[in-house]
Amino acid sequence: MQNLQVAPVSRSRIISNMPKPYTPEACHQYQTQFDAEVQTVCQQRNAGAIGLKMSKAVMVGDLYVGKTSLINRFCKNVFDRDYKATIGVDFEIERFEILGIPFNFQIWDTAGQEKFKCIASAYYRGAQVIITAFDLGDISTLENTRRWVQDALKENEPDTCSIFLVGTKKDTLSEAELERTEQDAVRLAIDLQAEYWSVSAKTGENVKEFFFRVASLAFEQSMKKELEKNRGNTAQIGVGNLIQLDGNSSDKRENETQLNMNCC
Amino acid sequence: METEQDEVAQDELGPEIALDKDPFQLTVEDVYDISHIVGQDLLKISREARGVSSLVSDLQFKIVRVLEMLEALVNQSSLSAEELKMERDNLKAEVERLLKDGPQMGVGPDKMVIDLTDPNRPRFTLQELRDVLQERNKLKVKLLVAQDELQCYKSGIIPSPDDQIVTLENESMITCSPRENESKEKSTVKSLFSFKQGKQT
């Protein structure tokens, strides 16, 4: 285990408390702390073997709502005023440290243009998180999120995805306009069992908060799932299916956690 | 009486026009007019010179035969003209219909016309785009791995750069082994994001 090559996680990507939701009206949970059991497991793990966890998120939604801009603001802290349509699909990998555990978060950015749908949809599968984006200033893009979510859910096992509905370009709306649109959006979010957020990639408002929330919930979710899987097998809790960074478990890594991009 | 004479005069003038006509404008009615005129003339001749009536009747048979030939020819040519007119009208209608259908003229439904002189015309297939994207994804992962490793060197996690051998093998394995092969360690990102070659279903 010596000479393990793990570049340290950036200090700005360390999470130790559960980030708050945007609105209590449409959120996945209200707790201000991570699940107690998960916290305990993470502490145990910290003392022992180094585990590494990962989750996959896909970003879907109409063209020109700002999916790529949102990701670029979070991952690169940049905002490009010029519109450049995404060709097919792109991805970013953000490395977090949550409750002391390294957590790799893949964010898949898909093209909104209809003609790329047959390419992008092949990348929906295996997603733990579906982020569906719409333009707060264009109500038709909100209506279309329902279809985007349906398409993304179709490619995944039932009850394996958590959904986030995110309204973009918050900076372009007045307070009153925002309030009106958010009412509609929250209603749809409840209907879709999604958590709702309003953000602006241009000003950066709520962008970091949003992705921290998404990553934290995804992390907690996958830890809980793992605990569930190992229940009744107490000796394994905390070691179980975590990836061990030694040579012996490489087969396991291959089978269980490798990212597959040759999917289409 | 005067009007009756005028009518007779006109009647007699009328058929004469047929003889002044362009032969290609001749109708079968004109041929009958000509036949009438010639018949009247032959009648006059046989009335005035009684001795030639048998000669005139011989001539009459020959003239009738010629007129029958003319009748057949005129009938035939007017029929051909009619056919050509109909064909022209049909073609006109066809052109109008095609023009109304717009730019897809001459192309079936669900087909697209590609302007081969357009330098920005569509060229590549969906599969080619998929392949390119996959290749890009792989390269991006390699870049992330390389950045990760660079970070390791920079932050001193890997102690002495002089002892390190960084090799790129089999297009996806990046190994960094200070001494032995057995201590080959993939970087964290590498181990998580290297790509399988197989197709997942």
Image (cartoon, coloured by chain):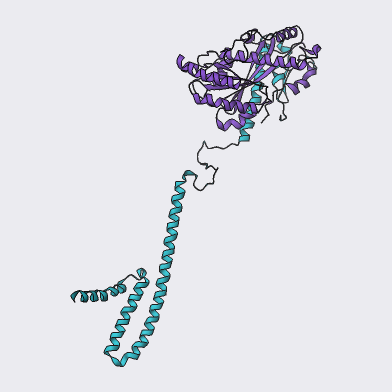
- Shown in purple, the chain is A
Q: Assign the N terminus of chain B to one quadrant of the image.
A: bottom left
Q: Colour of chain B?
A: cyan
A142 lies left or right of A35: left
Above or below for B80 versus B178: below
Residue B110: x %, y % from top left: 55, 42
Residue A173: x %, y % from top left: 46, 17
Q: Assign the C terminus of chain B to one quadrant of the image.
A: top right
In the depicted view, which residue is nearer to us: B34 or A245?
B34
- Residue B156 sits in quarter: top right
Residue B164: x %, y % from top left: 73, 14
In the depicted view, which residue is nearer to us: B156 or A241?
A241
Which residue occupies 45% across, 56% down? B91
In the depicted view, which residue is nearer to us: A82 or B65?
B65
Which residue occupies 70% across, 11% down? A101
- Residue A253 sits in quarter: top right
* Residue sitting farthest toward the bottom: B51
Residue B16: x %, y % from top left: 28, 75
B47 lies left or right of B189: left
Answer whether residue A84 is visible to the viewer in this image: no
Tag count in the figure? 0
Answer whether residue A88 is visible to the viewer in this image: yes
